[in-house]
Image: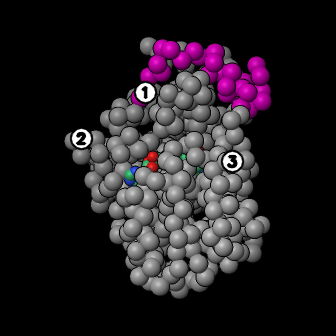
């Protein structure tokens, strides 16, 4: 098990560690025991993850002598909402959970965001730990302390910045992950390659077995490198006011495509298409070599991710979503672009016409 320091704030009080390894649950339980974060622990998980991994996690914690309960929620984004959050809060009260307790988020980004949010407001804030079980959660959502729930009006509209006491990334969880979820996560890995470590892109190609799924040993090194990249951005800009915005590469167009498709495109698919659009815009506006765009499209294709926008999604709808999101109707949008892979920058004003042309190009 490797431990990565996340150093935050001038006082360092929200600093913590990300522990990465395979089959680390017993080690995790010992670290928790020694750290004395709380006198009791409540694991929050979705029913799917709890059925597969709940016994392993609770068993390891109990063997170490920790007092632990389990609360389950239905799987899926629809649980990341206010009613589920309130329901969990009431169940915590009924269990007698007080300020000396600690929540453990066992699951993907949905469980992580919801549990972190609940921890940040329950009795004015109690401790929590992230135990991410999807690639997306291991390389992205469990790191950085962004928590939140969705409203009917939009995603992540209620939220807080609230750092966990620790993040435990166990690669063994990924062995039970559905194939669609693997692609979702790899889309974010491609993003890290493009904005920070171009070597990752070549490695993504060589590490895949002939069926397109990743080799487990290689995956471990890959996840660890992505954790390091994310934590460096978070350390530089914990509150997402400056350089952390680079992590939005592919996401502005991606989110708009997801919304304009009525969420028939998944997040990973939206981001893949958003990255292709951002790369093409980078070639037009920032001198990104054309062969880098083709390389990206080739890699995404081999990962089973889309590189062409379905005809049924109207470009005008996508642009409207982007401009509404950035509150800049008709004035163009700020986007993260690339001069080269590994050299991103924020372009404050990308003309709407340019975006529209690229969206149309991607439909052919
Ligand atoms: P998710 O949490 O819904 O998990 C996807 C599905 O996989 C669920 O059905 C779950 O039950 C199942 N699953 C999870 N782990 C499994 C395992 N090991 N084996 C078998 N099945 C498993 O989705 P996600 O993609 O992990 O996360 C998406 C969420 O993350 C979104 O709500 C998004 O807004 C959020 N997010 C947050 C941040 C952040 O910084 N906080 C960053 C990116 C995304
Ligand atoms: Zn994302």
Image: magenta residue range: 306-333
Q: Is residue 179 left or right of residue 67?
A: left
Q: Give the foreground label among 3 and 2.
A: 3
The first of marks 3 and 1 along the sequence is 3
Q: Which mark is residue 283?
A: none
Q: Give the foreground label among 2 and 1.
A: 2
Q: Residues within 10 Å of mark 2 (few under 14, many from 20)?
A: few
Q: Is mark 1 within 8 Å of ligand 2?
A: no
The first of marks 2 and 1 along the sequence is 2
Q: Is residue 181 above or below residue 90?
A: above
Q: Is residue 325 magenta?
A: yes
Q: Position of residue 19 (x, y in %)?
A: 48, 70
Q: Which mark is residue 307?
A: 1
Which residue occupies the foreground of this view, 22 or 197? 22
Q: Which residue is mark 3?
A: 82
The quadrant holding residue 294 is top left
Q: Residues within 10 Å of mark 3 (few under 14, many from 20)?
A: some
The residue under the point 69% across, 48% down is 82
Badge 1 marks a residue whose secondary structure is loop
Q: Is residue 317 above or below residue 244?
A: above
Badge 3 marks a residue whose secondary structure is helix
Q: Position of residue 76 (x, y in %)?
A: 51, 44
Q: Which mark is residue 211?
A: 2
The residue under the point 35% across, 34% down is 304
Spatial CA distance of label 3 from label 2 is 40 Å
């Amino acid at each position: 098990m490797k431990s990565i320091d996340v150093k935050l704030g001038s006082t360092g009080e929200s600093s913590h560690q990300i522990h990465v390894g395979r089959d680390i649950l017993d080690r995790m339980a010992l670290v928790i025991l020694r750290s004395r974060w709380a006198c009791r622990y409540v694991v929050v998980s979705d029913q799917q993850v709890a059925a597969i991994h709940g016994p392993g996690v609770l068993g390891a914690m109990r063997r170490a002598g920790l007092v632990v309960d389990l609360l389950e929620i239905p799987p899926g984004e629809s649980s990341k909402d206010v009613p589920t959050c309130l329901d969990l809060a009431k169940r915590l009260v009924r269990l007698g959970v007080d300020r000396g307790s600690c929540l453990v988020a066992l699951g993907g980004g949905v469980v992580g965001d919801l549990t972190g949010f609940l921890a940040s407001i329950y009795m004015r804030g109690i401790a929590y730990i992230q135990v991410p079980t999807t690639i997306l959660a291991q390389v992205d959502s469990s790191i950085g302390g962004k928590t939140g729930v969705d409203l009917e009006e939009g995603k992540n509209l209620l939220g807080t910045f609230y750092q966990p006491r620790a993040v435990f990334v166990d690669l063994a969880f990924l062995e039970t992950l559905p194939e669609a979820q693997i692609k979702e996560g790899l889309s974010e890995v491609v993003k890290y390659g493009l904005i920070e470590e171009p070597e990752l892109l070549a490695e993504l190609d060589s590490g895949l077995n002939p069926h397109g799924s990743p080799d487990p040993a290689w995956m471990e090194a890959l996840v660890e490198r992505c954790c390091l990249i994310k934590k460096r951005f978070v350390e530089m800009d914990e509150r997402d006011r400056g350089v952390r915005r680079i992590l939005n590469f592919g996401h502005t167009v991606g989110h708009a495509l997801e919304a304009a498709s009525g969420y028939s495109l998944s997040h990973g698919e939206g981001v893949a298409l958003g990255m292709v659009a951002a790369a093409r815009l980078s070639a037009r506006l920032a001198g990104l070599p054309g062969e880098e765009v083709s390389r990206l499209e080739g890699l995404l294709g081999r990962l089973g991710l889309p590189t062409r926008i379905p005809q049924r999604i109207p470009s005008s709808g996508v642009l409207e979503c982007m401009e509404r999101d950035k509150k800049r109707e008709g004035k163009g949008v700020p986007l993260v672009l690339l001069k080269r892979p590994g050299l991103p920058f924020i372009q404050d004003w990308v003309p709407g016409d340019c975006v529209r042309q690229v969206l149309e190009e991607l439909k052919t």
